[in-house]
Amino acid sequence: MGTYKQVIKLDPDPLAPYAISPGWQVGDVIFFSGQAAINEQGEVVGPGDFDAQLQQVFHNIDRLLHAAGSSRDQIVKVTIYLTDMGNFPKIVQARKVYFQYPYPADTVVEVRALALPDLMVEIDVIAVA
C-alpha cells in the first residue's frame, strides 16, 4: 500500500502557465512550490516594492494553506529567496508579523534573480496538514 499523495489545486491557478503544481500533500506533510508576488491573474504585484511583494507572497501562502485544509500555524519550514539581502531586516520583522512562537525553521538565500524580472522575494513552505 502506497503513501497517500494528492496535488493541491487552486482555481484560478497562476502557476498553470509555467507547468508547476501549486503544492502536494504527501501523508500529513504539505509541500508548496515557491510563492512569489503573483496574483490570481498571473500578474506581478508591486514591482520595486518589497513590502507589497511580501504581503502578496503571504496572501498566496494563506490561499494555498486554506486549499490544503491547513493554516499558517502548521508551517514547520520556510525557505526564503531574496534578490537583495538588504531586505533581510524586513524578513526578520515579517517573521514576527506572519508567524507566532515557536517560529518555523527557516533558510534565507540571496539569489541573482527569480523567475520573472520584477520579483524580489519567493518563499517555499513545508507544513503539516
Image (cartoon, rainbow, N blue to C red):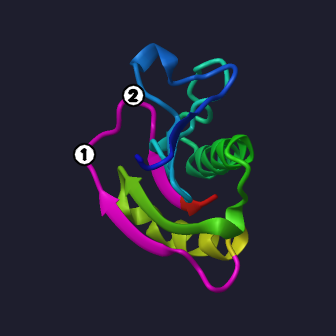
Q: Where's residue 85, x and y in %?
A: 36, 63
Q: What x and y, as percent, mark residue 106?
A: 44, 72
Q: What residue type is labelled 1?
A: Arg
> Mark 2, residues whose alpha carbon is within 10 Å: few (<14), some, or many (≥20)?
few
Instruction: Name above or below for residue 92 compared with residue 70.
Output: below
Q: Which quadrant would residue 127 be assigned to in this image?
A: bottom right
Q: Are the residues flagged by discs 1 and 2 in contact, CB closer than 8 Å? A: no
Q: What stretch is highlighted in magenta?
A: 100-126
In the depicted structure, whether residue 95 falls above or below residue 119: below
Name the secondary structure under disc 2.
loop
**Magenta span has 103?**
yes
For the C terminus, give its image quadrant: bottom right
Horizontal arrangement in the rendering, residue 85 relative to residue 17 (left or right): left
Is residue 119 shown in magenta? yes
**Residue that badge 2 annotates:** 116
Q: Which amino acid does label 2 sit on?
A: Leu
Q: Is mark 1 on a helix, strand or loop?
A: loop
* Picture layout, residue 30 above or below residue 9: below
Residue at left offset 45%, top offset 37%? 119
Residue receiving disc 1: 112
**Residue sitting at 25 percent across and 45 percent down?**
112
Q: Residue at x 50, y 18 (%)?
A: 16
Q: Where is residue 22 in the image (x, y as percent from the top left)?
A: 52, 34
Residue 2 — which label?
Answer: none
The residue nearer to you, when weighing 48 against 81, is 81
69 or 80, nearer to the observer: 69
Q: Which residue is situated farthest in the left direction here?
A: 112
Circle 1 crowding by C-alpha within 10 Å: few under 14, some 14–19, many from 20: few
Q: In this view, does 103 lie to the left or right of 89?
A: right
